[in-house]
Image (cartoon, rainbow, N blue to C red):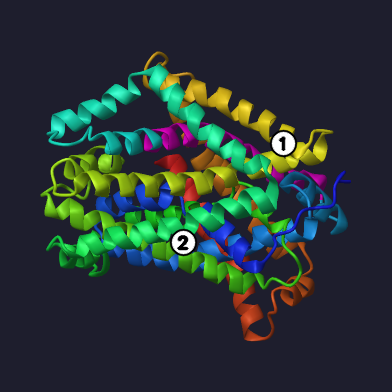
Amino acid sequence: MSKLVHAQWSSKMTFVLAAAGSAVGLGNIWRFSYMVGDSGGAAFVLVYLACVAVVGLPILVAEWLIGRRGQKNPINAMAELAKANGQPKAWALIGVSGVLAAFLILSFYSVIGGWSLSYTLNSVTGTFTGQDADGVGAIFTGLLGSPGLLLLWHTAFMALVVWIVARGVTKGLEGAVRTMMPALVVLLVVLVGYGMTTGHFGEALAFMFRPDWSALTGGVVLAAMGQAFFTLSLGMGIMMAYGSYLGEDVNLLGTARTVIILDTTIALLAGLAIFPIVFANGLSAGEGPGLIFVTLPLAFGNMTGGMLLGLMFFLLLTFAALTSAISLLEPVVEFVEERTPLTRVMAALVSAVAVWLLGIAALMSFNVWPEPVMFGLNVFDLLDTFTSKILLPLTGLGAIVFVAWCLDRRSVAAELNLSGSTEQLWQLVARYLAPLGVILVFVNSLLG
C-alpha cells in the first residue's frame, strides 16, 4: 500500500498539457526533422501519421488505463492488476521494464539536453556569427571533446529537472507544463512565421506534404512506424505513471486523440520552421542528427537576425527537452516514493543523483571513455540501443497485450465508452494490428 493518498491532476487540461509535453521532446524537434529529411519527406510523413493512429493511439490508451486502474507506480500497478485478473505475477516485469527504460533514457537524454542549454548560451553570445561549416563543426566537436563542459551542462539540466519534479504533481509537473508548453508553441509559430519570409516556405511545404512514392521503401515504413511509437513516450513507464494521477471522469480515447493531435502538430510545425531555413541557406535536409547542432547553427550564424532566431530555436529545443525529461524522471520518483520511507523531495533527489551518475559515464563516451563496453558499443550508444531497440518495444507490446487479452473485455469497453462497431474496431486494432506493428519495429531494429 502507498503511504500517501495518491496525487491527482487538478484538471483534464493540465493532464493533456503534461502528456503532450512528455510526448513533445527532442524526438519531435530533432529526431522527426532529420528522419523526414533522411527518408524522402512527404512519403515518410504520411506513413508516420497512419502509424500514429494504428499503433500509437491504442498503446497510449492502454498505458493510461493500466495506470488509472492501478493508482500506483507502473511496477505495482501491473502487479496488482495481474493479481486481480488472475494473471501471473510475471506481468509486473512490464512495469519494471518501463521504469528501467525511463531511468536509462534520462541518463543520456540529459546529456543531449545539456547540449541544448550550451547552444542557447552560444546563441546569446554570438558564437555562431560569421562561422563557416568547419567553424560550426569545430564548436560541436569541441563541446563533445570536453568532459568538463559536458558535465557542467549535464548537471545544470538535471538540476532543472529535479527542481521541477521534487515540487510534486500540482506545483511541479503542472506548473512547468503550464508555462513551457504555451511558450514552446509561441516560439514555434514565430519561427514558422519567419520561415514564410525566406522565399523557400513553398519548397518546405512540398517537401513535407507532396509525397514522392518512389521514396517509400520497406525501411521508410518501418522507420515511420518506429518514430510513431517513440514520439508518444510509449514504453517508458511515463504514461502509466501519468495515468495513475487520473480521475475516472477523463475519457481516455478522446484525450489520447487530443494529445496525439498536439504532438503531431508540433512535430509538423517544427519541420515547417526548420526546412525553410535549411533550403534558404542551400543546406541539405538529409544531414541526419547533425541537422540541429551543426547545420542550423551554420544558417543562424550567417543570416540577418540569426542571433535572435538561434536563441529562440534553442530555447524551444530546451523547453521540449525539459518537458520530456521531467516526465522521464517521474515514474522513477513515483516508484521510489511509494516503495520507500522517503519524502517526495528526497525521492526526487536520490533518483536524480543516480541518473546523473550514469549520465557521467554516457558523456565520457565522447571523450575520455570512447571504447566499447559491450556488443561493440560505448556507454552512450549502448544505453540508446538497449532502450530504444529492446526495452521500449517490449514494454509497449506488453502493455497493449495485457489490456487487450488479459483484462475483462466488457470492463475495458465500458471504461473506453465503446460499443458495437467501435468496440469491434478497438479489438481489431488493440489485439492484432498494434501488437503486429510493434513486433515489426522490434524485429527490424534488432536486425538493422
- What residue sits right under mark 1 in the picture? 345
Residue sitting at x 77%, y 64%: 407
Other residues around mark 2 within 10 Å, as few (<14) / some (14–19) / many (≥20): many
Q: Over which residues does the magenta segment extend?
A: 88-116
Quadrant location, the C terminus: top left
Q: Position of residue 203 (x, y in %)?
A: 16, 64
Q: Is residue 226 left or right of residue 145?
A: right
Other residues around mark 1 within 10 Å, as few (<14) / some (14–19) / many (≥20): some
Badge 2 marks a residue whose secondary structure is helix
Is 208 in front, or is 87? 208
Residue sitting at x 62%, y 85%: 421
Q: Position of residue 113 (x, y in %)?
A: 44, 37
Q: Quadrant of residue 206?
A: bottom left
Badge 1 marks a residue whose secondary structure is helix
**Kind of residue at disc 2:** Asp
Q: Position of residue 258 (x, y in %)?
A: 53, 70
Q: Quadrant of residue 99?
A: top right
In the image, is residue 97 above or below residue 279? Answer: above
- What residue sits right under mark 2 in the picture? 263
Who comes first in sequence, dot 1 or dot 2?
Answer: 2
Q: Position of residue 54 (x, y in %)?
A: 51, 67
Q: Is residue 186 left or right of residue 440?
A: left
Whether the magenta-drawn stretch holds residue 109 is answered as yes
Residue sitting at x 29%, y 34%: 122
Whether the magenta-drawn stretch holds residue 364 is answered as no
Q: CA distance from mark 1 to mark 2?
A: 30 Å
Q: Is residue 407 visible?
A: yes
**Kind of residue at disc 1:** Val
Residue sitting at x 56%, y 46%: 392
